[in-house]
Image (cartoon, rainbow, N blue to C red):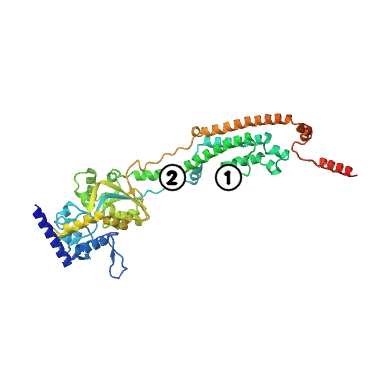
């Protein structure tokens, strides 16, 4: 066995060396189809071909050692068998010995394998159903305005307004009566008039509103009782703003709308084409055409083939571009285009991402190079294609030619992934904790203010200077000198001078 392996390896190396030295020229049959192969030159100039197949053949020609020229089948088909046993398209070019190789998005099928040898596949793909995206329903203006109030239930908004008014009133009342706050200090000459007006009725409400909108304020209360109330209000503001932002963010991140999701979920595979009785298209003479006509195992595929043969809901198109253009003019969910995914992956990105496709995971297809029966190139190029898979070169080519700006074009077909996220506005029960904190803060602030008033009265009752000046202060509680008192003081100074 070792001698046989050695002999086979030696023969392969010798034959491979002869091929490299010879530099044989191969005729390659293919089709113009973006992005596999397309002519970049302007009309009238010599053709300049680019694409996936062009890059693959360039790499193979360097490694194997050959040159090549392209030819194109007159009928523009991949290859299907006629009733008389003859073939069309690229398959006929091989059978008729007009070409040495087929290179393109040619799917391997059993009937084609009877007359053509296929190399190791360079791409594996699914059969997919292409459809137009559901039209996005635009919300009315009133509903869009209401969304900013949706994070909270109505009861939470009402309780928030009530908490605002009660807290603002409590801050004003405590600042007015507390002897250690700005109003009393200004009366005793220890604060300015502006400081005295920091917590009037209007400014108390403005202070609470500024805190609610996360804006700063010049002064905060000075007394302990008012500070307790303000601290509780700040805790309420932190919870309120945090809950509102998080709920609003979750509400705005629910894409797409319910009507669009429902449109996607209507179609999760080829079975839905029959169940929903929608029209469909396939390429004449393609691998999908053979699948629908000759499948004997899956009932829904047989029914699709019967519709195609009878000319009912199925119809043929000449190529991929024709099918995409016809689909573009149909409403969403009314017509489908059945083909291989890699063929439409590039095309769906050229129409503003208005299409999406659903994978039929039970049906897979392979793209391979085709050669005549018993060709010496079949195994040779198959080895290099396998090497390109291992090196990652074929992945590089696929990213180069099939990646575009539209990345969200595949529908996975799972209800869970496309299930609409439930949104629950914040209710009173969830918000009651912080309301209790505000209520407790106001109650404690009032009690502390009462204690501060008692302490102040007790402290001043033992001050003789305070008792001496008490009547004068009572006659003018705000500590402001009137016009008559100023005139009296001026007269006293005049009499003294005289």
Q: Which mark is on residue 215?
A: 1
Which of the two discs, 1 and 2, labels the residue nearer the N terminus?
Answer: 1
Residue 195 location (% of width, % of height): 68, 42
What is the secondary structure assignment of the residue under circle 1? loop
Depth order, front residue of 445/270: 445
In the rendered image, the vertical position of residue 4 relative to residue 257, given as above or below: below
Instruction: Mark yes or no: residue 72 visible.
Output: no
**Residue in the image at 77% along x and 36% along y:** 476
Q: Quadrant of residue 57?
A: bottom left
Residue at horizontal 42 percent and vertical 44 percent from the top: 254
**What residue is pinned by disc 2?**
253
Quadrant placement of the C terminus: top right
Mark 1–mark 2 Cα distance, whole angstroms, equals 27 Å
Q: Is residue 222 above or below residue 48?
A: above
- Between residues 336 and 43, which one lies in front from this camera angle? 43
Query: Where's residue 47, x and y in %?
Result: 28, 68
Q: Is residue 98 left or right of residue 270?
A: left
- Secondary structure under the numbered disc 2 in the rendered image: loop
Q: Residues within 10 Å of mark 1 (few under 14, many from 20)?
A: few
Q: Which mark identifies residue 307?
A: none
User: Is residue 408 shown above or below 22?
Assistant: above
Rendered view: 56 above or below 1: below
Question: Is residue 352 at least partly visible in the picture?
Answer: yes
């Amino acid at each position: 066995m070792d001698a046989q392996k050695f002999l086979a390896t030696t023969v392969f190396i010798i034959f491979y060396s002869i091929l490299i030295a010879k530099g044989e020229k191969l005729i390659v049959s293919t089709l113009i189809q973006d992005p596999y192969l397309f002519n970049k030159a302007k009309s009238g100039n010599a053709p300049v071909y680019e694409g996936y197949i062009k890059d693959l053949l360039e790499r193979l020609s360097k490694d194997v050692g050959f040159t090549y020229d392209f030819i194109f089948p007159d009928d523009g088909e991949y290859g299907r068998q006629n009733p008389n046993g003859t073939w069309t398209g690229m398959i006929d070019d091989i059978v008729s010995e007009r070409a040495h190789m087929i290179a393109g998005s040619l799917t391997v099928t059993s009937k084609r394998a009877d007359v053509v040898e296929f190399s190791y596949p360079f791409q594996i793909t699914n059969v997919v159903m292409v459809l137009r995206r559901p039209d996005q329903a635009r919300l009315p203006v009133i509903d869009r305005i209401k969304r900013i109030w949706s994070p909270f239930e109505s009861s939470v908004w009402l309780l928030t307004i009530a908490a605002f008014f009660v807290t603002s009133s409590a801050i004003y009342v405590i600042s007015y009566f507390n002897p250690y706050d700005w109003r009393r200090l200004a009366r005793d000459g220890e604060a300015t008039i502006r400081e005295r007006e920091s917590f009037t009725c209007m400014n108390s409400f403005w202070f609470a509103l500024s805190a609610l909108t996360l804006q700063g304020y010049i002064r905060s209360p000075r007394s302990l009782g008012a500070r307790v109330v303000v601290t509780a209000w700040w805790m309420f503001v932190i919870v309120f703003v945090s809950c509102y932002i998080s709920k609003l963010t979750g509400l705005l991140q629910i894409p797409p709308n319910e009507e669009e999701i429902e449109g996607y979920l209507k179609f999760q595979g080829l079975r839905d084409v029959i169940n929903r009785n929608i029209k469909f298209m396939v390429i004449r003479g393609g691998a999908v055409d053979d699948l629908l006509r000759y499948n004997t195992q899956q009932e829904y595929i047989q029914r699709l083939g019967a519709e195609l043969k009878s000319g009912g809901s199925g119809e043929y198109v000449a190529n991929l571009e024709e099918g995409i253009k016809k689909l573009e003019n149909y409403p969403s969910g009314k017509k489908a285009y059945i083909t291989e995914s890699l063929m439409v992956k590039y095309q769906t990105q050229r129409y503003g991402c208005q299409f999406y496709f659903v994978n039929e995971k039970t049906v897979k297809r392979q793209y391979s190079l085709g050669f005549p029966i018993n060709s010496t190139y079949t195994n040779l190029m198959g080895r290099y294609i396998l090497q390109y898979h291992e090196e990652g070169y074929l992945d590089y080519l696929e990213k180069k030619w099939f990646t575009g700006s539209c990345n969200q074009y595949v529908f996975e077909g799972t209800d869970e992934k496309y299930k609409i996220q439930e949104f629950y506005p914040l209710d009173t029960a969830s918000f009651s904790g912080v309301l209790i904190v505000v209520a407790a803060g106001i109650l404690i602030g009032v009690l502390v203010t009462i204690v501060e008033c008692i302490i102040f009265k007790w402290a001043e009752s033992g001050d003789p200077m305070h008792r001496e000046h008490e009547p004068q202060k009572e006659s003018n509680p705000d500590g402001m000198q009137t016009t008559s008192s100023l005139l009296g003081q001026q007269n006293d100074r005049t009499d003294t001078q005289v």
